[in-house]
Amino acid sequence: MSDITQGGPELAKKIDHTLLKPEARAKDYERLCNEAMAHGFFSVCVPPTYVPLARKLLRNSEVKVCTVIGFPHGLNDSPTKVFELQRAFDCGADEFDVVMNISALKSGDERAVRNELSSLVKAAQGKTVKVIIETSLLTDEEKVKACQAAEDSGAHFVKTSTGFAGGGATVADIQLLKKTIHTKMQIKASGGIRDLATALAMLEAGATRLGTSQGIAIVSGEPSTSPSQEKSVY
């Protein structure tokens, strides 16, 4: 645990090094992949269009390629989300962070939410699926229902945030999700994790993975000047 509390490689293995800004360029994603290899992050999290590039750059490394599905609002219809995931799968993605249909959940149609997520888990063919429930838009009761739907679908993680909805991970939310989960499902905290103290607080509360664009600052204790880290919603 001492290695984690001081940053370093053990903590790096819990980080999805993230770049999802719409204005980011190909060279920024190249830099992201190089940073991930240099620091030993668990994965890079990139938009679907950059999965092939990330797969190529990371082919001889242990860094995984994670991408987002139905991002950022989750309002694509289910066949579209499934196709998007299948396409990313074929391009070499290892993990999929899928945005739950928050509107359906808030409308009380939990069956539709569960069915969609089950279809996505099936399409992933055993690869890791993380369900983004956008905690900043939900009541505590809705957070519990969202977590239960994700768990029922067979997804591997529930994830707090996209970073695009005006809020991010909180210790209270991580604790609530941890209390709700009844299986081996894990929690990914994302949104607003920018320093070591916040990262450690999320892990202590029950998260096992962190999504952040500030991974270098977190593991090194030094602010990053890389363009892939500046003004990120993560």
Image (cartoon, rainbow, N blue to C red):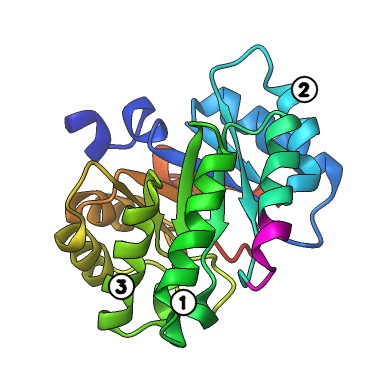
Q: Nearer the viewer, mark 1 or mark 3?
A: 3
Give the residues in magenta.
Answer: 75-81
Q: Which residue has dot 3 on it? A: 145
The answer to whether residue 78 is magenta is: yes
**Picture coordinates of residue 142, whole percent (x, y):** 32, 80
Query: Are circles 3 and 2 on residues that touch, CB within 8 Å?
Result: no
The residues tagged by marks 2 and 1 sit, at their Cα atoms, a distance apart of 33 Å
Which numbered dot is residue 167?
A: 1
Q: Residue at x 24, y 66 (%)?
A: 171
Which quarter of the rendered picture does the C terminus lie within?
A: bottom right
**Residue type beneath disc 1:** Gly
The answer to whether residue 196 is magenta is: no
**Residue type beneath disc 3:** Lys
Which quarter of the rendered picture does the N terminus lie within?
A: top left
Q: Crowding at label 1, few (<14), some or many (≥20) Cα neighbours within 10 Å?
A: some
Left or right: 45, with 194 as reference point: right
**Sequence-first disc among 1 and 3:** 3
